Image (cartoon, helix red, strand yellow):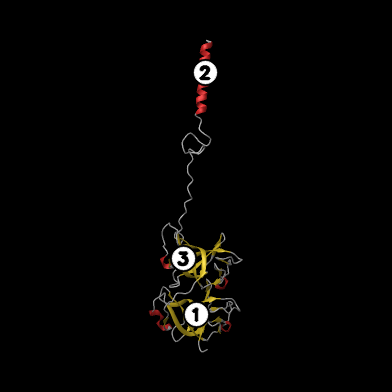
Amino acid sequence: MRRILGLVLVTVLAAAACAEAFEPPPGDAGSVGIPRGTASATPELPPVATPTRTPAVVDVADLPEEGDEVLPVRVLGWIEPGGSVVCRAGSCYVDLRDPRDPRRYVTLEVAVDAGGAPNTMHPLGSDFTDADLVVTTADGSTLRSGDHAWVTGTWMPDGDTLVAESIERGAAPKIKIVETTIARLKSKKAGTLVRVSGRLDTPFLLSCYGGTCNLYLASAAKPLRIEVRLGRKGEARPNTMWPLKDNFRAGSLRVIDAKKRTTRAGDRVVVEGWLVKTDDGTPYLDPVVKITRRGS
């Protein structure tokens, strides 16, 4: 019995000696060329860069009206408050008009900042006029209603909204101006930029909406309604008019022409504006983009 136990002990000691003799050297996990502790590690791959899409330069008229895909775009247009302005959640929604045909426009969402941070606009109150629209561009300059701008942002076709990310000052594209008379406007196509002349006159009933007021050009033909942008009283901003009180008199009319000269009712002027027609074909100009007093 003792002999058997001795043989077992010798066998165990011999096996332990063999295991010690074949122990892998430090730094080896038992496999040639694989460091200890990393035999099953997955190699770390470099991060994959997400491709960015270059904004496509498009006209207002070419923005898709349907679809779910949001698009990075760069659009030229002029900014104005429009008929109504909604401000919520730190943004205001204004109009971006097609500079080649202002009858076409989209909603532009602009972040609001009263301090004038880049690519933002000042908040508008409920009784706003065109004169209250102030937009700060990416370089810190200021745009007003009617100024042209390049807007880079995201087009949301499901809401017909362009979310502005960068706003830069733009230049008006070259557009042919059709010189005509008030009497011949009915034969001209709506959406045409026209130049006509007449005597500046006030309406019997003044109507102001969306930052413009209706005045008239009197001539031998039927008077022509023209929509003139509102400015601030005392401000010499070209091609605007000062606000009028409800019980105004014709003598209180003040229009600032393209050369910053004061123009009054009865003065002869040359007006450039976009031709619009009512449902029955009656022409009017909306908006007026330039007013020049004649004779000086």
Name the residue at the bottom extreme.
295
**Residue at the spot of label 3:** 74
Secondary structure type for disc 3: strand
Disc 1 element: strand
Q: First in sequence: mark 2 or mark 1?
A: 2
Mark in front: 2 vs 1: 2
Tell me how far mark 1 sits from mark 3, CA to CA. Answer: 27 Å
Looking at the picture, which amino acid does disc 1 mark? Lys
Above or below residue 265? Residue 171 is above
- Residue 61 in view: yes
The three-letter amino acid code for the residue at tag 2 is Val
- The picture places residue 194, in percent across and down from the top left corner, at 43, 80
User: Quick check: can you spot residue 83?
Assistant: no
Report the residue marked by disc 1: 290
Can you name the residue that lies furthest to the front here? Answer: 21
Of 139 and 143, which appears nearest the observer? 139
